[in-house]
Amino acid sequence: MVLFLIPLIAPNWIAPYDPTAVMPTEIFQPPSAHHWLGTDQFGRDILSRLIYGARNSLTLGIVSVSISVLISVPVGLAAGYYRGPLDAVTMRAVDIVMAFPGILLALVIIAILGPGLTNAMIAVGIGEAPAYTRVVRGSTLVVREHSYIEAARAAGTGDFRIMRDHVFPNVIQPLIVISTVGFAVAIVIGSSLGFLGLGAQPPAAEWGTMVSDGRNYLRTEWWISAFPGATIGVVVLTLNVLGDALRDILDPRLR
């Protein structure tokens, strides 16, 4: 996973070419020693665009997950801690939102905000927040019944302090696991938006956009779409394996 973070920090250190440089004499070059992953219809180096595209695609995942967490933690904590009408209304709203596929909800938000990488981050983050809210709320329902929560109430500790100091630290573990898996989901949805032309705008490199660039040349210049698609698959698989490993480590019932 560390290998995918290097392009995020300093892509210019390892990219052999400028990812946006148009080279008419290098159009549709197959993979070779000169261009390891070939070039696209504008002569741009695929490997360089993959490396620079990691910054956009991975940043989209990180920011989207952060937005989801920022929305879900206070809402889920409040719903699970106070229960009653607040919990009922919150969960019904979550059920309604989760009834729509994540990509469809993201498309609706993009239609309101307009295309672009920043708006795609916001759309994916809001679209995935209900799933995080349900996890936080479920964990809060379990934690609030513990005796140390009753002891804190008996000692006169306020609700906000109880949620901050006693409840939240105990819901971090499942939140970390779902955030890892949600990171993979955010990359897939973000790449789908890029494929549709609603994410990062040209000439910026982004994995979903790169797959879209080569869709008309799959029979002859297959490498234009194949390598970005394979990169998305490898990253998503790696994140899912990481999520499973974290679940096994953090869940004492699985030890």
Image (spheres, grey):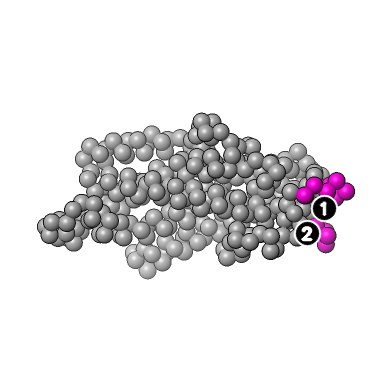
Say above or below: 146 vs 85.
below
Number of numbered callouts drawn? 2
Label 2 packing within 10 angstroms: few (<14), some (14-19), many (20+):
some
Residue 57 position, x and y percent, is 59, 50
Residue 188 position, x and y percent, is 56, 47
In this orientation, which residue lies closer to the viewer: 41 or 24?
A: 24
Residue occupying the point 62% across, 43% down: 200
**In the drawing, what numbered circle is on residue 30?**
1
**In the drawing, what numbered circle is on residue 41?**
none
Q: Is residue 88 left or right of residue 219?
A: left
Q: Considering only order in the chain, which callout, 2 or 1, is on the residue closer to the N terminus? A: 1
> Where are the magenta residues, as a range?
21-36
Q: What quarter of the picture does the C terminus occupy?
A: bottom left
Residue 225 shows in the view? yes
Residue occupying the point 85% across, 46% down: 24
Q: Quadrant of residue 202?
A: top right
Residue occupying the point 36% across, 38% down: 94
